[in-house]
Amino acid sequence: MKEKTIPIIVTTSYRGVFFGYAKPTTNTTVRLEKARMCVYWSADVNGITGLAANGPSKSCRIGPSAPAITLHGVTAIMEVSHEAEALWNQQPWG
């Protein structure tokens, strides 16, 4: 059975924080579809896990969606809640 893509946040050794859709993996290289970069997150989201649990707030800076991106040096992959996914998908650059 083919695994479906799920919403995830990926952090990299280059200090990047990205949201997008990918198949679950333990690899250190990940290809994200509909990828967005978190350029800045504010204290009210309570860190990176807060971005996965609750999504970005209005004071965060989220870049536009790219069709796909391949990330190297992956340090963490977090599954994203349905509520957080909705906010990532509507979050404009503030």
Image (cartoon, rainbow, N blue to C red):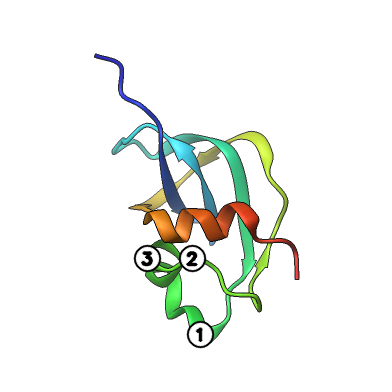
Q: Is residue 45 above or below residue 83?
A: below
x and y, in percent, of residue 59 in the image: 66, 79
Which residue is found at the position 75% from the left and 71% from the top? 94
Quarter of the rendering occupied by the N terminus: top left
Q: How far apart are marks 2 and 3 (CA)?
A: 6 Å
**Kind of residue at disc 3:** Ala
The residue that disc 1 covers is 44
Query: On the rendered structure, is 87 left or right of 46?
Result: right
Q: Distance between the residues labelled 2 and 1?
A: 11 Å
The residue that disc 3 covers is 53
The label number, if any, that marks residue 55 in the structure image: 2
First-in-chain label (2 vs 1): 1
Contact? badges 2 and 3 (CB < 8 Å):
yes
Q: Can residue 86 be seen in this view?
A: yes
Looking at the rendered structure, the secondary structure element under dot 1 is helix
Which residue is found at the position 41% from the left and 62% from the top? 52
x and y, in percent, of residue 30 in the image: 45, 36
Q: Which of 77 and 90 is in front in this view?
A: 90
Looking at the rendered structure, the secondary structure element under dot 2 is loop
Count the labels in the image: 3
**Kind of residue at disc 1:** Asp
Q: In this view, does 40 lie above or below 9?
A: below
Residue found at the very far top of the displayed protein = 1
Q: In which quarter of the image is residue 88?
A: bottom right
Q: Distance between the residues labelled 1 and 3?
A: 13 Å
**Kind of residue at disc 2:** Gly
Which residue is found at the position 52% from the left and 55% from the top? 86
Q: Which of 13 and 56 is in front in this view?
A: 56
Q: Is residue 82 above or below residue 3?
A: below
Contact? badges 1 and 3 (CB < 8 Å):
no
Looking at the rendered structure, the secondary structure element under dot 3 is helix
